[in-house]
Image (cartoon, rainbow, N blue to C red):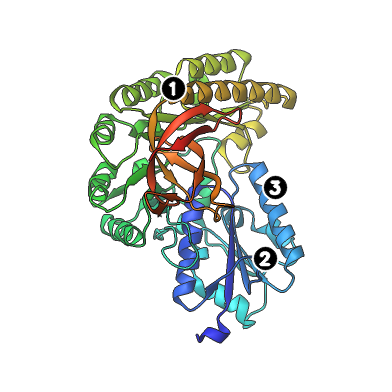
Amino acid sequence: MSDHIKKRVAAVTLGCKLNYAETSSIVDNLCQQGWQVSSIEEGADLIIIHTCAVTKQAEKKSRQKIRGIIRKNPASRVAVIGCYAQLNQDDLASIDGIDAILGSNDKFDLQSYNDITSGSILTPLVKVAPASTFDDVYQGYSLSSEMSTDRTRAFLKIQDGCDYGCAYCTIPMARGRSRSISLDQVVDRAHLLAASGYREIVLTGVNIGDYRYDDLVLCDLLRKLEKVNVSRIRISSIEPDFVDSELVSLVAQSEKIVPHFHIPLQSGSNSILKAMRRRYDAAMYRSRVMQAVEHITDCAIGADVIVGYPGETEEDFLQMYRFIEELPLAYLHVFSCSVRPNTPLARQIANKERNPIKSDEIAHRYAELIELGRRKESQFKERYTGKKCMVLFEGGKPAHNGIQQRSGYTRNYLRVLVESADNFAGQSISGNEVPVLIECLGDDLNLKGRVLS
C-alpha cells in the first residue's frame, strides 16, 4: 500500500489492561499491512472501539461511547469489538452506524477491517464465534511502533480465558477456557518491547496465575523474563490461590519483578465467598496477603471487592468490612454487584434461590467501603512521606517555561507528582526512572515530591 493511499485507523479501548494490550496488537498488525495510525480528531477511515461487558455500567458506557463516536464521525467506518460484541451482538446490531461487530476471537481477523473499509461487502459485518470453539490464544502487546510515543509501560498478554466459573462472572462466556501463549513467544515479544525502549512490562491476561504451557507455569516464565532488558516487570491482577510461597519468594529476591500485587478479594464473608464459587476462604486470603507483605519489602497489595451480592446480609457486610479493616492493603477497588445474564447467579435469582439487595442498601454499603478504601490508601501512602523513592515518569507535553507537573509511579505502584523541569542529569525525565523525595500526601491522595539531583 503506497504512502498516498494509506488507510488511517484510530482506536478507543474500554475496560481492562488486557483489552489495551489486544487493541495495541491489532493496530500494530494493521500498520504492518500498511495502515497509518491516526486519532479520532484527525479523522480516520476506521475507528475500532474495544468494548467491555463486565458490568451493566460497562455496557452502558460502551453504548454511550459508540453512539458518540458514530455521531461525530459520520465518514468513518466503525468496528465494535471485544466482550460486549461477544456477549450482546443483538444489542449492538440495533445501533445505526456500526459497520462491524467482531467477537473475542474474530477481532484479530485483519481481513474484516480491510473488507469494511474497502466497500467490498455489505455492512454491518457480524462475526462472533462461540466461546466454546476458542482453541487458539492470540498475542497481545503494547505497540512498539507508530501508535505509541510514550515508551514507559507496555502491556504484554500471556494468557486468555478462565476455567474458574465464579457464579457472577461472564468471562468464560466472553473469552472461553483458560489457555496460555507459549513461553518462547512471550519472551521474544518482551525482548522486542525492551528493544523499542519500554522500561516496564505489565503481564496481562484474564487469569495470569493460571499460566501453563508445556509443563511450565508462571514462575518459570517470570524467571525467563528477568533476563529481559527492562527496569520493571509487573504482575497484573492475580487470584489469591496463585500467590504462593514460590511466587512470593521469587518476587522478594528479584530486582526486576516489582513489589505490587492486585489480589481480588470480592468478599470477606465465607458464606458469600462460597456462594460466589470462589476458590478460597477469608483465612486463606489473609494468609496469602500476610505472607507477601512480611517477605517482600515495600509490598503494596490492592484488592477488588463486590458489595451488595444477592443474599448478602448485614452481618456478611460487617464481616467483610472488619476483615478489610484489618488487612494491610494499599488500596481498594469497590464494585456494586451487577447481575449478568446467563450466569449461575442470574439463574439463582430467577429461581428465587438468592434475593437481590435493595438499591439504597447497596449504595450505603458501597459508600462505607469507598471511605474505608480511601482511609487504607491514605494510611499506606503516608508511610512514604520523607522517603526517597525511584519513580518511573510517564510521557508528557513539553513544559511551559521549562516547568510543569509530571507524574510517575514507584515500583510498588504509588502515583507521584512533581513540579519538575523537563531535564534530569541532562535527560528528559519522561520515560526514565529517577530518585524523588516524597514530601507530602495531597488531598487527592497523590504523593507529591521533588526530583533529587
> Circle 1 — which element?
loop
Query: Which amino acid lies under the numbered mark 1 shown in the image of this protein?
Result: Arg
Q: Residues within 10 Å of mark 1 (few under 14, many from 20)?
A: few
Name the front one of labels 3 and 2: 2
Observer able to see residue 278: no
Find out whether the residues at labels 2 and 1 contact each other: C-beta distance under 8 Å. no
Using the image as rendered, state which of residue 256 and residue 149 is in the foreground: 149
Q: Which residue is mark 1?
A: 383
Who comes first in sequence, dot 2 or dot 1?
A: 2
Q: Which residue is mark 3?
A: 60
Using the image as rendered, state which of residue 47 and residue 145 is in the foreground: 145
Q: Residue at x 32, y 47 (%)?
A: 231
> Circle 3 — which element?
helix
Q: Position of residue 159 (x, y in %)?
A: 38, 51
Name the front one of labels 2 and 1: 1
> Circle 2 — which element?
loop
Find out whether the residues at labels 3 and 2 contact each other: C-beta distance under 8 Å. no
Q: Position of residue 152 (x, y in %)?
A: 42, 52
Q: Which residue occupies the extreme front position in the image?
A: 401
Who comes first in sequence, dot 3 or dot 2?
A: 2
